[in-house]
Amino acid sequence: MIYASGAEKFAIFLGWFFAGISGAILPVFFFFIGPAFDAFGTQTAEEARAETRKISIIMGCLGALVMITGFF
């Protein structure tokens, strides 16, 4: 007896795949939050601003990726 068609199995696989990506993004997010805090203590204000801007863009992209993978 076959309980799921090929299309249903593919949809289940896609859901599993995107859930895995979405779950893996949180540790990556924590990897970038440390340097964001470190940028304020040891550099000049201009260097800290540049470093924070770069990390903010990366974290924004990660947030957009979570939004996309969460949708699927």
Image (spheres, rainbow, N blue to C red):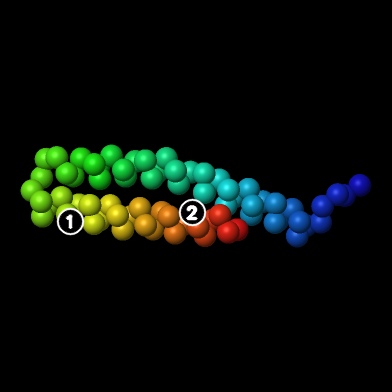
For label 2, the residue is 66
Q: Is residue 9 left or right of residue 26?
A: right
Residue located beneath label 1 in the image = 50
Image spot of residue 33 (x, y percent): 31, 43
Locate residue 66, reporting x and y percent.
48, 54
In percent of the image, x 55 and y 45: which residue is there?
A: 20
The circle on residue 15 is none
**Position in image of residue 48 (x %, y %):** 15, 50
10 or 42, nearer to the observer: 42
Q: Is residue 32 left or right of residue 47?
A: right
Please identify the residue farthest to the left as the structure is shown: 44
Q: Is residue 22 above or below residue 34?
A: below
Bin the neighbour count of mark 2 within 10 Å (Cα to Cα): few under 14, some 14-19, many 20 and up: many
Say whether marks 1 and 2 touch (CB < 8 Å): no
Q: Residue drawn at (76%, 56%), measured in percent from left and top?
A: 8
Most extreme residue toward the right is 1
Q: What amino acid is labelled 1 in the image?
A: Ala
Disc 1 packing (10 Å; few <14; some 14–19; many ≥20):
few
The amino acid pointed to by label 2 is Val
Q: In the rendered structure, which disc, 1 or 2, sits on the residue that comes first in sequence?
A: 1
Mark 1 element type: helix
* Mark 1 → mark 2, Cα distance in angstroms: 25 Å
Please state if 43 lies on the left or on the right of 17 as rendered.
Answer: left
Identify the image quadrant of the C terminus: bottom right
- Eyeballing the image, is 2 above or below 72? above
Q: Position of residue 44 (x, y in %)?
A: 8, 48
- Residue at screen point 70% across, 56% down: 10
Q: Is residue 11 above or below residue 16?
A: below
